[in-house]
């Protein structure tokens, strides 16, 4: 089964967007803006879920916008991709990546899932059972991703969205726990458009934080956070991604 691990906001200036999320959302910074292959990534922590800000592609958006979602599986990534493909959803081969160095080195493998959101990041995907072709693609793609010029070329066209499943090669829970707690993510509202059938075939955990909406127009993402501390922060927007807060009273006695 898949569990929500992070949401993705695309931005022309990840450092500035990170500051907005930290200051207005009460979200502790987990990773400052760092170049990873052909993109720049910055992360804040929202409880057990990360909010990642990406600079990707040669056509940066005028303002931050909801770009996608990331999941983790309860089994090795190859087994998870086999199940997802068997449900008729295409995936890419996993690609290995890393950030940091020494004791701060983080390694992971990630594969994209297609058909869930419009305009997926352009990468080869298949519904065939993972096999030798995927292993060769992973090895080749992971090698090329470590060459800066090639990585930049591969991410030049970002598409409109990205949905990934990630397998961490480090203790992600301990890494998150190394930062303050901050506001907890309670819910992510996702505009699925006409793709609700595809989402119904995704093997999501029952305790999913997603609320799927079939609205036909942007924005893609809306985020609900728990108020941290006695005062409830003001709702705000980060580009086209809305952030709203719920107090303890709202959750105990919903309207």
Image (spheres, rainbow, N blue to C red):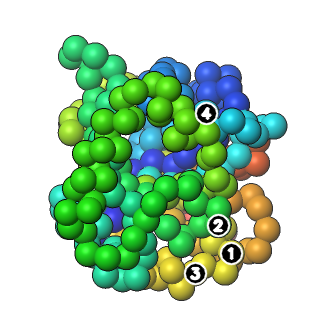
Name the image quarter holding residue 133. bottom left
Residue at the image point whose x is 62% and y is 27% from the top:
14
Above or below residue 177? Residue 2 is: below
Marks 2/1: CA–CA distance: 9 Å
Label 1 vs 4, first from the N-terminus? 4
Secondary element type, mark 2: loop
Label 2 vs 1, first from the N-terminus? 2
Q: Residues within 10 Å of mark 3 (few under 14, many from 20)?
A: some
Above or below residue 103? Residue 94 is: below
**Which residue is under mark 2?**
118
Secondary element type, mark 4: strand
Q: Are marks 4 and 3 in contact (CB under 8 Å)?
A: no
Residue 121 in picture, x, y percent from top left: 56, 54
Q: Which mark is residue 193?
A: 1
Q: Are marks 3 and 1 in contact (CB under 8 Å)?
A: no
Label 4 vs 3, first from the N-terminus? 4
Q: Is residue 74 visible?
A: no
Q: Are marks 1 and 4 in contact (CB under 8 Å)?
A: no
Secondary element type, mark 3: helix
Nearest to the eye among marks 4 and 3: give it: 4
Q: Are marks 2 and 4 in contact (CB under 8 Å)?
A: no
**Which residue is under mark 4?**
55
Residue at the image point whose x is 81% and y is 37% from the top:
62
Above or below residue 160? Residue 149 is: above
**Which residue is under mark 3?**
196
Residue at the image point whose x is 31% and y is 25% from the top:
178
Q: Residues within 10 Å of mark 2 (few under 14, many from 20)?
A: some
Residue 181 in picture, x, y percent from top left: 41, 32
Marks 2/3: CA–CA distance: 12 Å
The quadrant of the picture occupied by the N terminus is bottom left
């Amino acid at each position: 089964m898949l569990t929500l691990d992070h949401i993705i906001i695309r931005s022309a200036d990840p450092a500035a967007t990170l500051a907005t999320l930290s200051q207005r959302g009460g979200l502790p910074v987990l990773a400052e803006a760092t170049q990873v292959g052909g993109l720049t990534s910055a992360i804040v922590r929202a409880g057990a879920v990360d909010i990642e800000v990406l600079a990707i592609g040669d056509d940066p958006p005028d303002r931050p916008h909801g770009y996608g979602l990331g999941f983790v599986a309860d089994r090795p990534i190859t087994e998870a991709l086999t199940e997802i493909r068997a449900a008729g959803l295409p995936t890419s081969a996993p690609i290995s990546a890393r950030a940091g160095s020494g004791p701060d080195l983080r390694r992971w493998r990630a594969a994209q899932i297609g058909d869930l959101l419009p305009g997926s990041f352009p990468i080869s995907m298949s519904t065939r059972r993972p096999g030798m072709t995927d292993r060769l693609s992973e090895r080749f793609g992971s090698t090329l991703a470590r060459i800066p010029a090639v990585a930049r070329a591969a991410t030049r066209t970002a598409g409109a969205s990205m949905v990934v499943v990630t397998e961490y090669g480090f203790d992600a829970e301990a890494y998150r726990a190394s930062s303050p707690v901050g506001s907890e993510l309670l819910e992510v509202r996702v505009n699925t458009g006409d793709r609700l059938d595809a989402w119904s075939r995704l093997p999501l955990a029952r305790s999913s934080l997603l609320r799927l909406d079939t609205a036909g127009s942007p924005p893609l993402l809306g985020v609900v956070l728990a108020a941290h501390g006695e005062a409830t922060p003001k709702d705000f927007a980060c580009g086209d991604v809305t952030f709203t807060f719920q107090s303890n009273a709202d959750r105990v006695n919903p309207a």
